[in-house]
Image (spheres, helix red, strand yellow):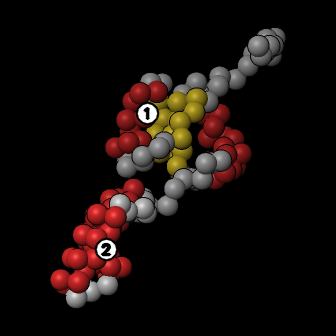
Amino acid sequence: MRLTPQEREALDRLASEQQVSVGELVRQLLAPHLARAERFSARLVPDEPQADPMRRREHEWLREHPERVAQLAGQWIVLEEDQLIAHGSDSLEVFQAARQAGIRVPYILRIPEPRQRDAFFIGL
């Protein structure tokens, strides 16, 4: 930090009056501001662990429960790790159920309807 000669002189004078070093004076002056910044940054760190961004456990659940997934065809579902939290035909209702269950970032997906044997799918 660069100080003007007048600022440096004022710090020297104030430190001399309080019988502390300039460094100690600066620490004393900054301490309340640093404590406030630390309290603020602590609020930015979540208390609970973050969900796996790849949602590996949710994908495992889908692979391990093919019969249940087949029963949910055409519905929206919410998975949280290895638990089915909610399902239904209305995505908003399913989302709201997840939030009511305390899930901040729900993993929501729609289980597709089974394809007919004489139909084919073209992805564009």
Dot 1 corresponds to which residue? 94
Is any atom of residue 123 visible in this view? yes
Q: Residue at x 46, y 40 (%)?
A: 86
Residue 11 in picture, x, y percent from top left: 27, 72
Residue 115 in picture, x, y percent from top left: 73, 19
Where 2 sits versus 23, above or below?
above
Question: Residue 122 or 15: which is nearer the viewer?
Answer: 15
Disc 2: CA contacts within 10 A as few (<14), some (14-19) or many (>=20): few
Q: Residue at x 28, y 76 (%)?
A: 12
Disc 1: CA contacts within 10 A as few (<14), some (14-19) or many (>=20): many
- Residue type (three-letter) at the residue carrying disc 2: Val
**Along the polypeptide, which appears first: circle 1 or circle 2?**
2
- Indicate which disc residue 16 carries: none
Number of residue marks? 2
- Indicate which disc residue 26 carries: 2
Report whether 116 appears left or right of 31: right
Where 3 sits versus 13, above or below?
above
Q: Residue 26, located in which quarter of the rendered image?
A: bottom left
Where 70 sits versus 14, above or below?
above
Assign a secondary structure to mark 1: helix
Is any atom of residue 28 visible in this view? no
Where 35 sits versus 92, above or below?
below
Question: Residue 15 or 86: which is nearer the viewer?
Answer: 15
